Amino acid sequence: MNIQCHFDTGSAYRCVVFDKEIPENGEFNLIGTHYNGRTHDEVKEILFNNCQITKIPQGLTKTFPNLNIINIYHSNLKNLVKADLEEYKNIKKFTVFDDLIDIVPGDLFENCKKLEKIVMNFKSLTVVEPDILDRLDKLKYVDMSEYGFYDSATSNPSASTNLDQIKTNLFDRFFKHDEVFIKNFVRRLQRKVHYQPRFIPVPRPGQTVEEHIKLQNEFYSDIKAFTLDDTTKDFQIQIDKHDFPVHKFLLAARSPTLAELLKNNPEVENLNLVDISVEIFEIILKFLYTDELPGDDETNFLHLFAAAGKLKIKKLMNFAANKLNDMIDEENVLEIFKIACKYEQQELKQKAFGLIKEKYPKSKFKDEWIDDAEKVEKLIEFLKKMEEMEKSFEDMM
């Protein structure tokens, strides 16, 4: 299987693959014209951007024997395991940005002794095993900043940094917690103190992943019990004449939009939400109390995405965006593009804009219009009218 790529100079001489489907079995050839007559042997970096990749691509070192930087951006990577990095023992930098990884195993980089820089930013992270940085003696820089997991000792990625200090800082910020953390968190909620939780999805020292998940599930079960306890509900959401008794502290803890509204209006005892249907709010409410995500049956993910975006419920918003990314077609592409622009969902916006350009190949949609949904919509309306006029003219002939 041949896959088109191009070569350029990034942080090193690199191969760039954009918007392609990469097979799992590694049976593919990268086809492109080298920059200034250079060769495969000179390629040090590879970048997969907006591709369809379920696992780390295999066989790259057969094509690029001196490869030492792997970057995967916005490519729906779903699985990270040590075996998939077996051939990449010489990599110095590993980057995965904004994908669907839910578990990062502790032995992932066990064979990558030369790693100096790790950047991993995930949407759906559930578990990080705390020994992930063990055995990486050359490591200088680690960034998982979206989840409070960041340290380079200085802001300069190239700075010389003591690995032990990095591990200590990461442990304090990301791993160090136990049942006391959970109990204190619940206590704050029960006192109705405004508190924005930062769930730390890793096991505590000496705890297995299974034990941690069990504890986390027990925690959510305790919170879920609140849904059945009307005596402690102190707030009311109104939607289309339907009343939803809720807990003010939970709304404030899980939705930044509602937290800000309640903070600015502490005496308010009810809230009327518009532009959100009863069915969608029921899904949202279940998620707020239990962290359970909806199934595909009869769920309007476009409306769910819009509602989650309005309430700034990031995890639910990203979940709905992933579903829309799989469902997008010529019929719904404009609506998805508009809502992706409104709530700045970059991956979804890019895919929708690409499909719009494919749908109207003769029209010149400028790349800078990707952030201007109104202009794109007006042009599409104009193109539709032109098509209707052409059809009417043909019918007359």
Image (tube, grey):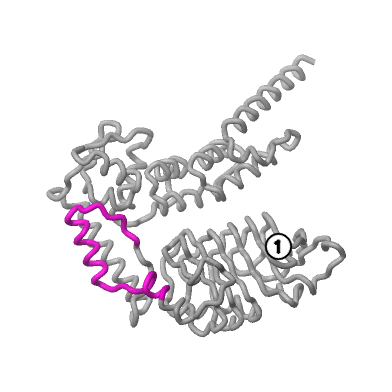
Determine the secondary structure under disc 1.
Answer: loop
Above-or-below relation of 346 to 214? above
Q: Residue at x 30, y 31 (%)?
A: 240
Image quadrant holding the C terminus, namely top right
Magenta residues, start to end: 169-198
Residue with the mark numbered 1: 10
Determine the image quadrant of residue 359. top right
Does any portion of residue 173 appear in the rendered image?
yes
Counting from the top left corner in percent of width and height, residue 166 is at 46, 76
Seen from this angle, which residue lies furthest top? 396
Q: Residue 86's spot in the image, x, y percent?
A: 62, 80
Residue 151 picture location, percent across and down:
47, 70
Q: Residue at 38%, 70% (x, y): give it.
A: 173
Identify which residue is drawn at 33% across, 48% down.
Answer: 255
Q: Could you say which quadrant of the image residue 389 lies in?
A: top right
**From the image, which quarter does the N terminus lie in?**
bottom right
- Left/right placement of residue 314 relative to residue 349 reads left
**The one of 248 and 360 positioned closer to us in this rendering:** 248
Query: Is 190 part of what is drawn in magenta?
Result: yes
Q: Is residue 53 left or right of residue 249?
A: right
Look at 67% across and 63% down and name the residue there.
Answer: 47
221 over 233 or under it: above or below: below
Q: Is residue 202 visible?
A: no
Identified by mark 1, the residue type is: Gly
- Residue reaching furthest right? 37
Foreground of the two, 144 or 334: 144
Query: Dot 1, crowdedness within 10 Å: few (<14), some or many (≥20)?
Result: few
Q: What is the total number of numbered labels drawn onto the structure image?
A: 1
Main secondary structure of the magenta stretch: helix
Residue 119 on the magenta span? no
